Image (spheres, coloured by chain):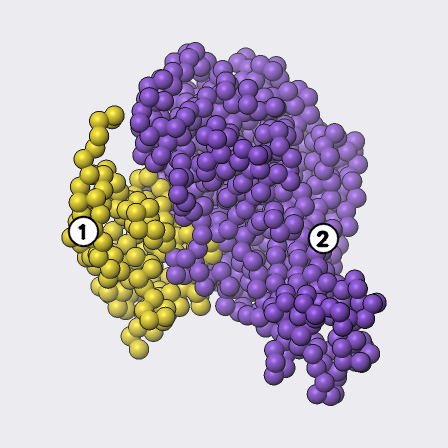
């Protein structure tokens, strides 16, 4: 424990911006995102991969960033909640969550949004059952989920045009 | 246009939807240090020695703290709310001499990074001598193993609540139903954000906290004497809080450790962020209650005339806030029913389990579950349909004074039942149920009626301990027109997701005739704003009454000043002025003319250009602080009598549940929730609270439990074991509302965030109904597949219920 831990050099692209850093091998991806880069929209809510507050997209796949080491994400492209808004325009999911009261305290919201992104990329017109499954790895203690499901349905409609 | 009853865009969403909130763990600064806590693996153990040498020698570790050291640094232990002997309990933020629950912090390490602090923690050697653990309150009351030697007993409180003529009612009863034991289990609403704090105790004495405590008015009163600092030297701020549900009221103990650690580092900022497992192990569980030897007297029509019973609360290792739970339940003594005669012998005991904390529905939920079980068990035994049983017993006249002097402001429970039946499709389900029973399937329909009493009279604390210096209630708001003419509001509530910024802006918009987007409501809580009193915080379903009344009162005072000022500027009479929006923004104008003065002009005049003001306007500041105080008096502590809360929101839920006979799994097939919180300020937000409270209740009823083994090991200490409810288990909720405005709040609103634990009552009732004819009675509040399976398996055992029919 007291021996000096060799740092490892990694390159990760987050929200279109590329970063090169030397990190301890034990650093979690979520710690890298929050503490190294200061992107604090991605949250931590548990220590057993249950709550999904830390969900980001790693090469388009929804990933619990608390369960991946930063070194494992070397060379990957990552999208976090901060990357959803484009040119000052909120993503339809962000708008829909707000319009449908899909968030209260907002702590689960970034993770929920990222899981929803992945869900809609795979299933642009999901059924309620598919939505429930798509966010089943994301815990929300405030909303009771009903409004989140509504929000995702509304965003799906909006994105279908 | 009116802004009350509308759902404008939430102000909070602007930042939260972008991931730009500011939660405690988001706070970073140069030189920030990190705190890690070393915890007892045992529920009850003497601490023989603690060796911190190896930890302190680790590069990157700044310092350590132990219980013995903390005891020396603190002028006194945290104030105990209970009377003697509980008042003699010593509660330090690190265990001193003995650990009394699994997960209790025994030492702390401060280091340059969170990982180094954890490394340091792993190097601390603690030698324990394990003692027998006391894991139930009944066992604790035997006083064989004493947890707190300074108190000499495990009982923290005992008192009898007696009203009416109980023995006479039993003597005259047509039927007496006896229930040997009912038990309400341990769970918590566990917010997704854990407890966290950044503390900075500067060498010259000032102490800064950035934290997620949800009842700062109370926390500062506990922290100041324990840390030997004046309240004014403590600067406490919150910003975004990721849910609390009452649980974050008690994190002042960890705030104290972080403060002492900062002081030991010479005043550097020290951050502590709890892990989820730490949270579940040690940060606070909802209270567990056992109801013994209950007897219910009924007349020949099935109307309940009296209840007598013995209730025991398990408050875990330290009573902390919890002795208040010994009284708070009595806000809803008769629940929604007209029972006039009660004798409840209430006691509370410490056990070697995590301390109990206020949890959504705090203390009333347990009692309401008890009363709902009584209704359903009596209905079952007397063969009266559950809906009819309720209609026979509901209170129907309002305001209604309960046997212990509480005043139910308004309500219409039969109308709520009607509405819930409509939403769920009652008649249809009744038919389906008959068919299912014909096929031997277990399908049940359950009703739960509950109350969410809001706006506490803190005077009730004196029923528990007459020496406590608390009574009444209050909340603060400030409003000002700044020098640019902006409308700025601050609140004392420090919310955690309840949308206070939005609803406050609606009230201001309504009062000033402007729109909510023109009102800037500061986020969070800050002692530096001077917007707080001892009651300030977000708890006990009260913001719609206390917080918004404070905002409203502040608006009235501001408007009076603005009228005087505008009358002077426009050379008009005050009566001719009206508030509104003109071409140049918010303004006051002279009715029927184009003469107007806007807020910018007025704000600048007062703040920048005041030589032109007439002398009689010298007291106008456009900067108002208003304290709202509900009209309470101190209860009669001898008789345990008085008005304990101002408003009574009500919820009525219906659930349809089918039980899988092979595995006991209860599946919710349909769910309806009807809410009455008086006048609704913002329907979307009220709906959100109803859904959230419903999820907590359903989660608690069918999944979530803090289960201890006999040595005091918590078996459900991670989310994987505790299994909080997810989107896969949460049913679609058919939601409806009725509105019976409260005559006691200026706006007719009633606080409603807690929800009264309605799903617990409802699910228990539905399980009971599903098991109709199986020879079992539901006497537990937790209905996992395991526990339902056990009920079915043990159906040949006694139900624990006896009926004596006399006429
Ligand atoms: S923090 Fe809970 S799953 Fe990652
Ligand atoms: S909005 Fe608070 S946890 Fe989901």
Write down the quadrant of residue A2 in the picture.
top left
**Quadrant assignment for the N terminus of chain B:** bottom right
Residue B711, position in %: x, y? 41, 20
- For the residue pair A14 and B652, the one nearer the viewer reads as A14
Residue B763, position in %: x, y? 48, 46
The numbered mark at residue B789 is: none
In the image: residue B344, left or right of residue B735: right
- Is the CB atom of the residue marked by disc 2 within 8 angstroms of ligand 2's nearest atom? no
Write down the quadrant of residue B485 in the picture.
bottom right
Q: Which residue is mark 1?
A: A11
In the image: residue B635, left or right of residue B244: right
Residue B355, position in %: x, y? 52, 30
Task: Read off the chain for label 1.
Answer: A
Q: Is residue A16 visible?
A: yes
Q: Which residue is mark 2?
A: B627
Chain in purple, by letter, is: B
Chain in yellow, by letter, is: A
The residue depicted at 40 percent of the width and 64 percent of the height is: A97
Nearest to the eye among marks 2 and 1: give it.
Answer: 1
SS at badge 2: strand
Measure the C-alpha gap from mark 2 to mark 1: 55 Å
SS at badge 1: strand
Task: Read off the chain for label 2.
Answer: B
Q: Would you say the residues marked 2 and 1 are in contact, meaning their CB atoms lie under 8 Å apart?
A: no
Image vertical order of residue A6 relative to residue A92, above or below? above
Residue B286, position in %: x, y? 52, 37
């Amino acid at each position: 424990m007291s021996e000096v831990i060799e740092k490892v050099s990694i390159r990760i692209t987050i929200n279109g911006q590329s970063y090169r850093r030397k990190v301890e091998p034990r650093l979690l991806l979520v710690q890298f995102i929050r503490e190294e880069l200061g992107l604090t929209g991605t949250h931590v809510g548990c220590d057993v991969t249950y709550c999904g507050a830390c969900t980001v997209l790693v090469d388009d796949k929804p990933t619990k960033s608390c369960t991946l080491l930063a070194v494992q994400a070397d060379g990957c492209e990552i999208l976090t909640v901060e990357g959803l808004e484009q040119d000052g325009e909120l993503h339809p999911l962000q708008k829909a969550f707000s319009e449908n009261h899909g968030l209260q305290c907002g702590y689960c919201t970034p993770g929920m949004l990222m899981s929803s992104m992945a869900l809609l990329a795979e299933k642009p017109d999901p059924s309620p059952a598919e939505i429930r499954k798509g966010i089943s790895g994301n815990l929300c203690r405030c909303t009771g989920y009903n409004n989140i499901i509504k929000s995702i349905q509304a965003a799906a409609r909006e994105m279908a045009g | 246009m009116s802004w009350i009853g509308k759902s404008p865009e939430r102000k909070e969403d602007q930042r939260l939807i972008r991931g730009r909130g500011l939660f405690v763990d988001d706070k970073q600064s140069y030189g920030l240090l990190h705190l890690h806590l070393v915890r007892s693996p045992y529920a009850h153990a003497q601490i023989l020695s603690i060796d911190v040498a190896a930890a302190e020698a680790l590069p990157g570790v700044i310092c350590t703290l132990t219980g013995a050291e903390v005891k020396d640094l603190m002028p006194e232990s945290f104030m105990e709310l209970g009377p003697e002997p509980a008042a003699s309990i010593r509660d330090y933020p690190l265990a001193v001499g003995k650990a009394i629950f699994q997960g209790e912090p025994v030492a702390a390490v401060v280091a340059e990074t969170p990982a180094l602090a954890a490394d340091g923690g792993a190097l601390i050697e603690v030698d324990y001598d394990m003692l027998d653990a006391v894991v139930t309150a009944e066992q604790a009351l035997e006083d064989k193993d004493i947890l707190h030697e300074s108190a000499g007993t495990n009982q923290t409180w005992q008192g009898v609540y007696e009203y009416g003529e109980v023995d006479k009612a039993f003597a005259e009863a047509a039927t007496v139903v006896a229930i040997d034991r009912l038990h309400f289990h341990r769970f918590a609403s566990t917010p997704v954000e854990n407890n966290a704090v950044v503390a900075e105790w500067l060498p010259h004495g000032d102490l800064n906290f950035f934290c997620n405590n949800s009842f700062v008015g109370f926390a500062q009163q506990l922290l100041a004497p324990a840390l030997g600092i004046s309240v004014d030297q403590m600067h406490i701020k919150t910003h975004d809080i990721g849910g609390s549900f009452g649980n974050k009221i008690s994190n002042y103990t960890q705030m104290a450790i972080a403060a002492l650690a900062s002081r030991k580092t010479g005043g550097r900022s020290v951050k502590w962020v709890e892990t989820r497992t730490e949270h579940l192990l040690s940060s606070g569980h909802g209270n567990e209650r056992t109801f013994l030897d209950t007897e219910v007297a009924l007349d020949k029509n099935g109307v309940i005339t009296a209840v007598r019973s013995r209730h025991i609360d398990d408050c875990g290792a330290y009573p902390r806030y919890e002795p208040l739970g010994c009284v708070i339940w009595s806000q809803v003594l008769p629940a929604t029913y007209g029972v006039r005669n009660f004798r409840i012998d209430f006691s509370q005991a410490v056990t070697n389990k995590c301390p109990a904390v206020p949890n959504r529905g705090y203390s009333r939920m347990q009692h309401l579950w008890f009363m709902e079980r009584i209704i359903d068990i009596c209905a079952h035994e007397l063969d009266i349909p559950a809906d009819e049983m309720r209609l026979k017993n509901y209170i129907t006249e309002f305001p209604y004074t309960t046997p212990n002097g509480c005043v139910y402001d308004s309500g219409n429970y039969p109308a709520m039942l009607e509405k819930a039946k409509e939403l769920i499709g009652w008649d249809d389900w009744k038919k389906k149920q008959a068919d299912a029973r014909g096929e031997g399937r277990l399908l049940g329909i359950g009703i739960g009626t509950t109350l969410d009493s809001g706006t506490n009279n803190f005077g009730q604390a004196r029923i528990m301990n007459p020496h406590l210096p608390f009574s009444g209630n209050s909340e603060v708001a400030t409003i000002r027109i700044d020098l640019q003419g902006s409308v700025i509001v601050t609140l004392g509530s420090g919310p955690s997701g309840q949308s206070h910024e939005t609803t406050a802006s609606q009230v201001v918009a309504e009062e000033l005739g402007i729109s909510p987007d023109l009102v800037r409501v500061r986020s969070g809580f800050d002692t530096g704003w001077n917007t707080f009193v001892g009651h300030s915080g977000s708890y006990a379903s009260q913001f719609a009454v206390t917080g918004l009344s404070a905002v409203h009162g502040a608006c009235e005072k501001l408007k009076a000043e603005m009228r005087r000022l505008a009358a002077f500027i426009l050379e008009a009479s005050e009566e001719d002025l009206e508030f509104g929006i003109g071409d140049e923004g918010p303004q006051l104008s002279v009715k029927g003319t184009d003469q107007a003065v806007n807020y910018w002009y007025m704000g600048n005049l007062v703040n920048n250009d005041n030589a032109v003001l007439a002398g009689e306007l010298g007291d106008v500041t456009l900067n108002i602080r208003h304290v709202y105080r509900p009209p309470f008096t101190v209860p009669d502590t001898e008789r345990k009598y008085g008005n304990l809360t101002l408003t009574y929101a009500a919820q009525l839920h219906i659930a349809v549940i089918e039980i899988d006979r092979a595995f006991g799994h209860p599946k919710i097939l349909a769910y309806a929730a009807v809410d009455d919180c008086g006048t609704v300020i913002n329907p979307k937000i009220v709906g959100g609270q109803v859904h959230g409270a419903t999820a907590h209740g359903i989660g608690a009823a069918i999944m979530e439990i803090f289960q201890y083994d006999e040595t005091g090991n918590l078996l459900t200490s991670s989310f994987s074991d505790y299994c909080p409810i997810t989107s896969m288990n949460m049913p679609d909720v058919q939601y409806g509302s009725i509105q019976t405005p409260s005559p006691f709040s200026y706006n007719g609103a009633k606080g409603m965030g807690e929800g009264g634990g309605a799903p617990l009552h409802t699910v228990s009732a539905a399980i009971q109904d599903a098991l109709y004819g199986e020879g079992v009675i539901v006497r537990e509040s937790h209905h996992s597949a395991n526990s339902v399976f056990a009920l079915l398996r043990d159906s040949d055992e006694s139900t624990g219920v006896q009926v004596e029919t006399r006429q």
